[in-house]
Amino acid sequence: MTEHTKTDGLPAMDASPVPQVLERAAPRNERMAGDKIECNACPVLCQISAGKTGACDRYANAAGVLIRVDPVVLLRKTLDEGDKQVVPFTARDEAATSVVPSEELFVTGIGASTTYPDYKPAPFIVSSQAQGVDVVTVVTEGIFSYCSLKVKIDTDRWLGPEQANVRCKGEVVGHVTTAEYGSQMLSLGGVHHLTGGSKKEGRVTCDMMQLLGNKQAVEFTIDGGAQVVIQAGRAPIVNGVEEERMRVGCGSATVGIFAKQFYGQADEVVVVDDHITGVLTQHQAGRCLGMRPSGIRIRGRKSTPGRYFQVANPGTGWGGTDIADPMSIIEGWDAESAWPGLRLLMVSTTGEHSAWFELDEQLVPRSMPMPEPVMSTVARIGENCEPSLCTVLFLGGAGGSLRAGVTENPVQLTRAIKQALVNVTCGGAPAYVWPGGGITVMVDVMRMPDNSFGTVPTPAIVAPIEFSMRLDDYQALGGHMGYVRPLAEVLASGAWHNDGAPTGRRIDSFVPANAWPLGLPPMLG
């Protein structure tokens, strides 16, 4: 038994009544025990004992036969709940082969197996029709070492300094990158963390990426910053507190948006923000409204009128700063401009923090109950804030040998994608292909089916990828035409390299927010 072979049983096999039988195992290694088989689905080449899974938990030895534990996932435009069960690929399944129109089904790479060894054509090269046009979809699971996750966290809370290490279970798995408007950004994973560090770092990075990609929660700590729990499609939890809102805009934008509503209700409004703190009477919005200058003096570096940088350090307090007392950013008042009774509203960019003050005879701000109309405007700020959310984008390099499963001349696939002749999807979800060389794809994991990602212990991430194009374009780029099979035949017998053995499949509902993979122009335009 190799160090990569699992020693536990096969609970996942029990859950899948029709596991996928793979290509015949590799020629027997004479030094391998008689009850083991060698899996050639990735470079690890696990020697798997009977009744056990390989290191990735995706392949197993079932009575001497190498099987794929998880079913292949197909998408259907319209789906009844009863169709979601795992069923075998079989010609006797009339519902799959004749009742369902071919334009209703799309074979994804989830559970499809890989092209390793890389000289093999992709497991599924499926022909069908879309809008009367003959199309082909090349389907595989890619093994990605060059891959990462870009995480957008909607919050004003300061998570940590730019370039700070992000840790998971004590291991460095990424870094803080440049903040964006109302959001903090992390870059997680990547080839150097997967393979360039210690074995533990690579293993933790790989497990973390699989969990986040599969929409599960992962806890991180940021050097010199916060502890944060991230889960795609859910609000972040920063230092144990679940975030609720992302800001409506910077302090200057908030002043501009709500200036008319502040007018007549307050004599001065300061919107506290780590980026740009806004001061209403100095701001162009206040000047256009003819507001009287209040004489307020704000700490920080003045930008343009009514806009201040660096009023405080970043933090988890008011407006993403480190302050708990809003008066700490006020240096004082110009006695020639300010007046007793001046009404001052201090508010954050999300409306979560607010306070009302009035100047006394000595021009000292005194805390007072906030008037109801002002409270309504503060509530309106909160109403205009979108819910705080974590967005996880998978970014992977699909160049290299993966392309050999599509064509004998891999550069032709790259060129066809750049010419917009090929639609690239991941689990049926639309993928953005980055400009420049290679095939670097990026996809929102929330638009993919559940449990789309797996791992292999090299370590690397396993992710589905599909290339759809016109049939004549596939022939022109030198595709494996001898392995193109109609959808009905695929539904009957599964992947081409299974020698006709039955395989498991599951039909999932199509995500309505996605474009149907076989209907995007210019492929069919």
Image (cartoon, grey):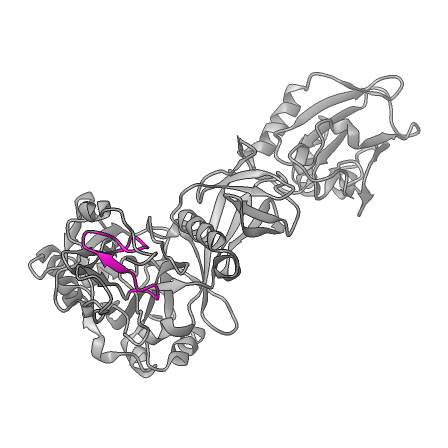
Residue 108 or residue 128, whichever sits in front: 108
Residue 118, above or below 386? below
335 displayed left or right of 490: right
Q: Is residue 421 visible?
A: no
- Report x, y in % for residue 326: 74, 28
The residue closer to the viewer here, 63 or 409, is 63
The residue shown at (76%, 21%) is 357
Q: Residue furthest front?
A: 31
- Total labels: the figure holds 0
Q: Which residues are magenta?
A: 41-60
The quadrant where residue 45 appears: bottom left
In the rendered structure, the answer to whether residue 10 lies left or right of residue 93 reads right
Residue 198 percent location from the top left of the image: 50, 56
Extreme residue toward the right, this view: 336
Residue 472 position, x and y percent, is: 29, 80
Image x and y of residue 453, in percent: 36, 54
Image quadrant for the N terminus? Answer: bottom left
| Residue 237 visible | yes
State the quadrant of the C terminus. Answer: bottom left
Q: Residue at x 18, y 46 (%)?
A: 14
Residue 241 vs 170, above or below: the answer is above
Asked if residue 239 is positioned above or below residue 72 in the image, the reply reads: above
- 466 vs 419, left or right, is left
Q: Residue at x 40, y 45 (%)?
A: 215
